[in-house]
Image (tube, grey):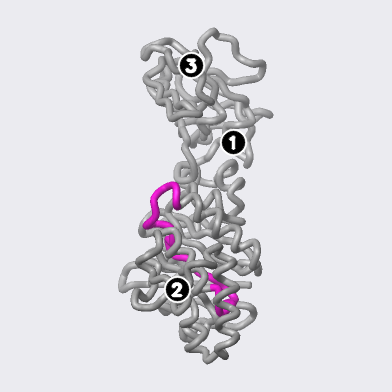
Amino acid sequence: MIEISGLRKDYGSVVALHDTELSVPTGEFLTLLGPSGSGKTTLLNLIAGMAAPTRGRIVINGRDVTEVPSEKRGLGMVFQNYALMPHMTVSENIAFPLEIRRVPRAEIRRRVAEVLELVRLPHVGDRKPKELSGGQQQRISIARCIVYKPDLILMDEPLGALDKKLREQMQLEIRRIHKELGITMLYVTHDQEEALNMSDRIMLMNAGRVEQIGTPDELYFEPCTQFAADFIGASTLLDATVAETGEPALLRLSASESCRVRLHSPASVGAAGKLLLRPEALRLVQNGQVAAGHNVLSGHLDNTLVTGATSKHFVTLDSGATVSIQELTDPSTTRLEPGLRVQVSWPAETGRFLER
């Protein structure tokens, strides 16, 4: 278990990490997500002991490690560049952390064989790193990390150097390894899809502060701030003002446009903010037939992008705002001409009002 309290890091007059509180239960896969400069890598480095905090405490499994050297914290780290030693074989690379801990040779051989099986590369022990693909090298890097059974594994953008297909394969591999071992993992990335796919929980960071922490579903479907709504997943954010506070509430979007939405937190009449709409919740309507209880806005079709199984329609509303609609590809809609008058509809429960 990790307990962080009041953790802060200053670099001169720049605050890289504001006072941060965090509790990570044993066995959790927590992703630190955010744009460049958000503080996620700073936090990881503080936990790893690679930087000293300005103030605050770091406790791992009941032990205060705030001032403990990195090598004595019982941590494992996996980096983007693999950090494998090119002159050593795969088995020698994996064995290295055991050798410096003076583990008996027979035990080293057993553990190396065990982790090679775990990462599904039992046949590459005698090869050099340069003979492996990028995905294989990253799996060996993970094997070297887990071979000495650390209490906590820290991963800093480990898949950043891989192409899209390999990244997706490695996401599945890392999750499988995590579930098999039950080790606590902290994973840093700026890739929202990676975070949504892999995490038990996500800690979204912005400008050195925690923006929101929760499960992938909570961050995607229940963002607490406009930043979270915009950063996690594709979204449309429309200016909105609360006109009525009933159930559902009425939002005024423009002089001629309004919609119904369920408020997830108290808001008074006149409150200004944004209406969050996810593209997969919207439907493109051509014939005016809108389901009962659904909101509807009018506009014209700008363009349609077909990406295979799904298509994305871009519609400019009569107010001038643009929305995107994602649907399963249907030839009857992919052939629609730009400029066509259309309507956009969605059920009240799928929209979300975010007050300023």
Residue in view at x 50 percent, y 68 percent: 142
Tell me which label, 3 or 2, sits earlier in the chain.
Answer: 2
Give the extent of the magenta segment. Answer: 146-166
Residue for badge 1: 268
Residue 4 visible in the snapshot:
no
Which x, y percent locates residue 333? Answer: 48, 16
Residue for badge 2: 126
Kind of residue at disc 2: Asp
Q: Residue 331: which disc?
A: 3
Q: Residue furthest left?
A: 12
Report if residue 149 lies within the magenta region: yes
Which x, y percent locates residue 298? Answer: 47, 15
Residue 300 visible in the snapshot:
yes
Which x, y percent locates residue 293? Answer: 66, 19
- Report the number of discs: 3
Give SS at disc 1. Answer: loop
Q: Nearer the viewer, mark 3 or mark 1?
A: 3
